Image (tube, rainbow, N blue to C red):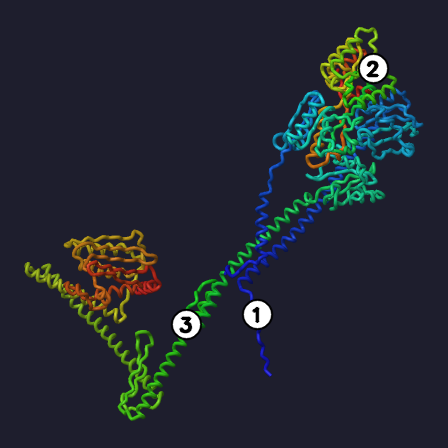
Amino acid sequence: MLGNIRFHRGWNILIAVIVTSLFLSGCGTQTPKVYRVGIVNANTSFAVIGEGFKAEMTKLGYTENENIVYIVENPAQNPDAIQSSVKKLIEDDKVDVIFGFPALEAKALYAATAGTNFPAVFGYGQTEGGNLVKSVREPGGSLTGVRYPGPEMMSRRLEMLTEMVPTVKRVWISYDENNPNMPASLEALRSTASSLDVTLVEVPITTIEEFGADLEARADLDDIGFDAILSMPDQFNTSADVFAMLNEFATEHKIPVAGGVEFQAKQGALFVNTTDLTNVGSLAAPLVDKILKGAAPGTIPVVTPEQRVVINAQVAEKLGITIPEGLLKMADEVIK
Amino acid sequence: MIKTRTNSPRRTRGLSAILATTFFALSVLTLLFSGGVLLFLNVQTQRQAIVSQQQVIAQAAAGKVSNFIQEKFIALTTTVSTAKLDTVSADRKQTLEGLMSGQPAFRQVAWLDAQDREVATVSRTSRIASGRLIEKLDTDAQAQVRQNQNYISPIYFDDVSSEPLIVMAIPMNDAVGAFQGTLVAEVNLKFMWDVVDQLKVGETGYAYVVDEQGNLIAFTDTARVLRGENVASISKVGEFVRDLSEPSGAASQAEIYTGLDGTTIVGSYAPLGTPSWAVIAELPWQEAYRDVIQATILSIVVVLGVAMAASVAGVVMARRLAVPLVNLTNTAGRIAAGEMALEADVQGPREVANLATAFNSMSTSLKAMIDKEIVSRTVLQTTVDLYMSFVEKVAQGDLAQRLDLFAYESEPGQAEPLYVLGSNLNKMVSSLAEITDRNAQLLAETQRARDEAEEANRIKSQFLASMSHELRTPLNAILNFTKLLRKGIQGPVNERQIDTLSEVVASSQHLLSLINDVLDVSKIQSGALTLFVEENVALQDIVYAGARTAESLLKDKPVTLVKDIGADLPLILCDQRRVQQVLLNLLGNAAKFTDHGTITLSVKRQDDQILFVIKDTGAGIPKDQQDYIFEPFIQTETGIKHAGGTGLGLPISRSLVEAHGGRIWLESAPGEGSTFMFTLPIESPDLRQQFQGSKDLLHG
């Protein structure tokens, strides 16, 4: 008789556990978290970094509007505006992490996150001469990112210029003296110039209007005072309008321009040594990914992007310059 | 001294519990054993597959890293073999630029002459930033190269970018093998990191590279590499470092240990050979043993499922077996308590049902024995009481005392004499033995009288049968000759003579019918009635013939015959003449006693028999007369009022129906008509036997 057979208590527990387990096994799905990532970019010449970043994030499994939302801020190119955007992203938009690029944005991120645990990643921030990170191996704090290799790029730019045009002994540079990247780059450049027995004709400025003033003053002189122009890493030199003015002057006076942004090679620079900006964004994505997965930014080493050389053989020909075969072989791209 | 053993009460388990537990235990043990064996074999196979897979993964990863290094050495060696060693500085630089252009991992290369002076150098980065290569080649390295050996430096990191770097150097010998210089390259291992990054170890596994001291030199988590972490404490790394003295060149056996990420993994290492590095591939054990885990879970679920099913089956079987036994036990208990009329339900499996049947049989026998014993004791006691009373009264001088008949009821309503003792004092009875003898004598006389009566009845029936036969023969002659006379065959007869002859024919036919009935009754009573059984008899023919006859009887009455004859009437085994006789008798009675209304004839199949129903709207039969209308020579008052009829039709019908194995009965009430019903079996062993007898008779 069933009524006379009573299951032992242990049986009841066992059956309950099995049934519960089977039930729960079908209830394990959870809504995936949607991450909020802030992007700050004032200098839109570097917008391609953001594109490279998003593309790489997609490869890492983040799909926009599904499991990640990007809140993009494009403030004016001044520290206060950038600072406000960063503050808005942190306080109003409640983002999980901020990715900012290039230099001014990196500095603003450092200012906003210093002493806090709020994670941020900079793109194209210069680590030398500044205080963005404690060291590239162990950044410390709550900031890590993709380094702007300014000093060695500036040195290499000058080296390449002298290798291509050994007669160059005076090089004109004009730069924003307030740009955070500038001190370290200048230091490396001056050191290299000294070792190469090259004189730097330095024109420090603070506004874009001042940029052309020195060139205008020299335009009508018999000796303009320099043999080549070297582009510096600031927002003035990387501006298309400024480069157009520089290129016009250089063409008129048949002097080479060593550029630092890829478009300059196509628009008249003898060569540019730069970094692949898309690659900068791609390198930043794994850092953000690690932070979203719980890693502390201070423990994630800063990464350095690969350098890229583009030589304009047409310009060389117009200037009567013979580019060494070895440099042409080592160039990533030669415009013929 | 006699020892007595007392069985102490022991708590026993019920049959149901034993069966359920046994079923559960057997099924679970069997499943556990077979499942365990299968699981063990599966685990062994999977483990072997995992070990092999891990070794392959580690070996493949090591191959990729090794290829990276070897590719660099090949590039250097190729450059040396194609370079003009005695060329000028510009050509040397061009050679180096050619080397650099094809090797993006080379940060800078340098050409050292035989005196280890840098005679040409090409750098991908600023030479100021990267430093002079010759300064990165220490004395030992230079000596190693001079000894015609390739050199690889320990890994180091760029001060500014923290990129991982190594220096590789190979000797530059002339055609006769004389040392002419050194080709040095600084290699950016970030490219090797990319190779390691892209190594796939399962879905969640990872690989990393360690040097001969167990230092981590390539891993996805570059922070750990940049910290210069030594991981020789990890099982496989330590094993690699220890085995360096006797390198096997093959991937190690995979093992489970705590991996680089601190979790339990299945890992294996594969040495690169040159340099003395190793690639360690680690796969979380959950992923490695996923199939085994799933198989284990599945096995457990199956075992539990089957065990539960077995338990339920055990409970169900136990119910089937135990319930009848428990009921039997309860019945036995109640009978023991005095409820002697109880019977156990015969149910459950055959053996248990047989047990219940045997128990009931035993119970019935026991009850009979007890009843008999009670009667015996009662009779004896009563007899003794009577006798003692009689003796006492005689002793007191009451000589007129009589000992009267004493009887008891052997069955309800049936009294049987037991003791008939002396009827007066002159026949003094002195003992119970005399009473018993007297009683036996009395019973014998009663039996003899009964036999004599039965014999007389049989002789009477035989006499009637014989007489009927003897009467019928001359009567048939009278009937036939009268018909001949009426037809004028023996001379012309006038109308008046024809009427008279018709009266003679009618009277003769009535007398013949009467004699036939008497003959049938006689046969029935003497047990001489036999059926002429035929097979495949079509009932519809009989029924419709009977109906036609009835309709002819009703032609002068306002009575309608309604026929409800089943279309599916089967062919049956019967004496069709006798069946027709019964049907005609009942239809004739209905026609006779119904003056208006309807007579309904219904013939239907009911299971394995045929049901005939003859319902009329006649006067009906009172209840008290229904009891004896099937008795011979007895008619109802209505029947008596109607002319004709012998009172033998219904008794004959009943005998004929019963001779077929059927049953006949009626339902009637005064003023509501009568319904006579009878059944006939479609087939029965007895009829089949009679059919065989009829056939034998026909075929002699």
User: Relative to B219, does residue B689 appear above or below in the rendering?
Assistant: below
User: Relative to B305, does residue A331 appear above or below in the rendering?
Assistant: above
Task: Say which quadrant the C terminus of chain A sits in.
Answer: top right
Q: Mark 2 points at which residue?
A: A201
Residue A286 is situated, as x and y percent measured from the top left of the image, at: 71, 32
Residue B472 is situated, as x and y percent measured from the top left of the image, at: 18, 68
Three-letter amino acid code at the position of disc 1: Arg
User: Relative to B302, does residue A218 appear above or below in the rendering?
Assistant: above
Q: Name the residue under label 3.
A: B340
Q: Work out whether residue B222 or residue B652 is closer to the camera in this orientation and state it.
A: B222
Q: For the residues labelled 3 and 1, say whether their Cβ atoms are less than 8 Å apart.
A: no
Residue shown at 63% from the left, 36% from the top: A33
Both on one chain, marks 3 and 2? no
Front disc: 3 or 2: 2
Label 3, label 2: how many angstroms apart (C-alpha)? 134 Å
Dot 2 surroundings within 10 Å: few (below 14), some, or many (20 or more)?
some
Please, which chain is the residue tagged with disc 1 on?
A: B
Front disc: 3 or 1: 1
Label 2, label 1: how many angstroms apart (C-alpha)? 115 Å
Three-letter amino acid code at the position of disc 3: Met
Please, which chain is the residue tagged with disc 2 on?
A: A
Q: Work out whether residue A295 or residue B638 is closer to the camera in this orientation and state it.
A: A295
Q: Is mark 3 on a helix, strand or loop?
A: loop
Q: Mark 1 points at which residue?
A: B10
Q: For the residues labelled 3 and 2, say whether their Cβ atoms are less than 8 Å apart.
A: no
